[in-house]
Image (tube, rainbow, N blue to C red):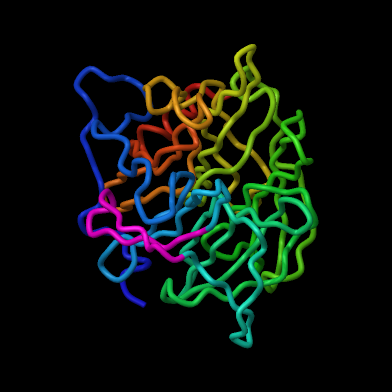
């Protein structure tokens, strides 16, 4: 495996902050980067995850088919902006190499660089939505583990290294609908199979923009003194739900502890591609490229359950904003 852990990402997507802009995150001026019908039999691609691998950007993408059922697809790009999405969905195998039966739907993946492999986490079907885990070394073969949790659970995100000898995963236990059942929990595992020591990290409802739900977004970003975590927050309005991006900083050695939580959203639906689409008023962050050498961050997010978009910031800018506006 090459380049997975390099601090310097070659040809990383980037656009300078617009002159006079004072917010913590700014949008890519050429959004969306993936429009409708990007590949055969796929109507929309959104809520997807990209990483740097073998001198290119490769990702696992949520593709809603023409029957409106979501599945996962691999995509490749030289610049992290223009992706070619494979027309065939990912086929998962067990540790013996046997092809597994399609679970029925898969959506909202995260991809975690980990040692000499990648971990893929997504929402799967186990008599209801719950989290699934797979490993891959080449984005060609995906070895799936048993489901870590019972239904219902969503938004599984694993930390990019073991902490105190364990894998750590953030998740959002839920129910079958859009009710006020959306808090972030932390769980531990020694082997990616058996999970326990569940701890509450953060409850929803502390601000209007995340009154209904909060959930982990991209892979946590390690800082000198903690973990930067982008989250999504959900509010219910008289015109439906609104999904925004927020930010918190977790303790470095015990990420169940929130050190700072920003009372303001970092980004909320305002552009037409965010406010109009299959599900209006949705910004849903699922992956972030980080260049530790210069502090740049490129955030991939789904817009209105229709498009894939990019936004940018720097570690210094967003961390300072979160701390300055922390509850």
The stretch in magenta equals 72-88
Q: On the rendered image, what quadrant is the N terminus found in?
A: bottom left
Give coordinates of residue 181: x percent, y percent.
77, 34
Give above or below for 234 relative to 93: above
User: Can you tell which quarter of the image residue 76 is in?
Assistant: bottom left
Q: Quadrant of the C terminus?
A: top right
Residue 185 appears left or right of 121: right
Apparent side of residue 235 relative to residue 11 in the rendered image (left or right): right
Q: In the drawing, does residue 134 fall left or right of residue 176? A: left
Left or right of 127? Residue 101 is: left
Name the spot of residue 219 as percent of width and height, x first: 50, 52
Residue positioned 34% across, 44% down in the render: 34
Question: With respect to residue 263, does 137 lie above or below?
Answer: below
Q: Residue at x 63, y 88 (%)?
A: 96
Percent from the top left, x then y, of residue 8? 26, 59
| Number of numbered labels in the structure image | 0
Which residue is situated farthest in the top direction here? 238
Q: Is residue 84 magenta?
A: yes
Which quarter of the figure has residue 56?
A: bottom left
Which quadrant of the view contains residue 99?
bottom right
Residue 176 is one of the magenta-drawn residues: no
Name the residue: 54% across, 71% down. Answer: 91
Give coordinates of residue 159: x percent, y percent.
56, 57
- Identify the residue at image location x=63%, y=49%: 255
Query: As displayed, is residue 71 above or below residue 95?
Result: above
């Amino acid at each position: 495996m090459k380049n997975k852990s390099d601090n310097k990402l070659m040809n990383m997507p980037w656009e300078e902050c617009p002159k006079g802009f004072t917010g913590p995150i700014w949008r890519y001026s050429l959004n969306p980067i993936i429009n409708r019908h990007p590949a055969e039999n796929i109507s929309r691609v959104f809520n997807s995850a990209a990483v740097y691998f073998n001198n290119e950007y490769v990702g696992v993408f949520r593709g809603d088919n023409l029957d409106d059922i979501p599945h996962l697809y691999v995509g490749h790009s030289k610049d992290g902006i223009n992706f070619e999405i494979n027309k065939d969905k990912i086929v998962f195998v067990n540790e013996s190499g046997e092809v597994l039966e399609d679970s029925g739907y898969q959506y909202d993946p995260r991809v975690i660089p980990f040692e000499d492999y990648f971990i893929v986490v997504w929402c799967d079907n186990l008599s209801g939505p719950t989290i699934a885990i797979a490993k891959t070394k080449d984005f060609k073969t995906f070895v799936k583990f048993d489901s870590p949790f019972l239904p219902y659970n969503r938004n599984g995100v694993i930390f990019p290294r073991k902490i105190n000898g364990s894998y750590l995963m953030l998740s959002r236990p839920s129910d079958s609908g859009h009710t006020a059942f959306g808090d972030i929990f932390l769980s531990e595992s020694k082997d990616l199979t058996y999970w326990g020591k569940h701890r509450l990290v953060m409850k929803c409802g502390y601000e209007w923009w995340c009154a209904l739900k909060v959930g982990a977004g991209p892979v946590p970003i390690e800082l000198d003194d903690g973990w930067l975590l982008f989250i999504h927050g959900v509010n219910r309005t008289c015109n439906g739900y609104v999904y925004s991006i927020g930010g918190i900083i977790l303790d470095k050695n015990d990420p169940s502890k929130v050190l700072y939580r920003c009372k303001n959203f970092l980004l909320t639906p305002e552009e037409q591609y965010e406010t109009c689409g299959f599900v209006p008023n949705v910004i849903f962050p699922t992956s972030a490229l980080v260049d530790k050498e210069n502090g740049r961050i490129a955030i991939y997010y789904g817009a209105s359950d229709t498009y894939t978009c990019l936004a940018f910031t720097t570690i210094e800018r967003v961390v300072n904003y979160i701390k300055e506006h922390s509850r």
